[in-house]
Image (cartoon, rainbow, N blue to C red):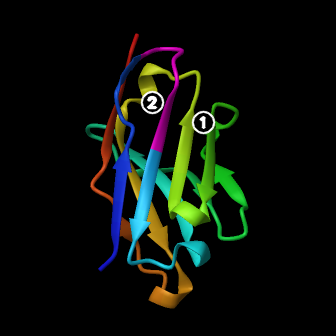
Amino acid sequence: QVQLVESGGDLVQAGGSLRLSCTASGLIFSISTMGWYRQAPGKQRELVAAITSAGSTNYADSVKGRFTISRDNAKNTVYLQMNSLKPEDTAVYYCNGRNARRGWLDYWGQGTQVTVSS
């Protein structure tokens, strides 16, 4: 059974920083592409950042230069460092994992709330 457990969401003032963590179990983490998505009220879920098993990364244009995704395969954990936060970053942030061994099925965490006050 695959489980992705996020942590680190909080209420923060604009300009502040947060680091989200997602620890995976039941998934061969080292071969998985891991991603962070977010969903704001009334909006569709969108990709924030992703990192492949080889360490290649991609980011949404809205977070480039402010957010950094990284992974620690020894800890089965992916991180999202968020700096210079803006009120428009307010959303529920979801961890995603997928790999070829599991047919590229999407596995999701339960989400963690990030609220940025102006």
For marks 2 and 1, the one nearer the N-term is 1
Residue 76 shown left or right of residue 24 in the figure: right
Q: Residue at x 61, y 56 (%)?
A: 71
Residue farthest toward the top in the current orientation of the protein: 118
Assign a secondary structure to mark 1: helix
Q: Which amino acid does the dot numbered 1 rest on?
A: Val
Region in magenta: 13-20
Which residue carries the number 2 mark?
89
Q: Which amino acid does the dot numbered 2 rest on?
A: Asp
Query: Is residue 58 magenta-colored?
Result: no
Dot 1 surroundings within 10 Å: few (below 14), some, or many (20 or more)?
Answer: some
Vertical relation: 66 (above or below) 33: above
Residues at marks 2 and 1, CA–CA distance in whole angstroms: 9 Å
Q: Quadrant of the N terminus?
A: bottom left
Which residue carries the number 1 mark?
63
Assign a secondary structure to mark 2: helix
Q: Residue at x 55, y 86 (%)?
A: 100
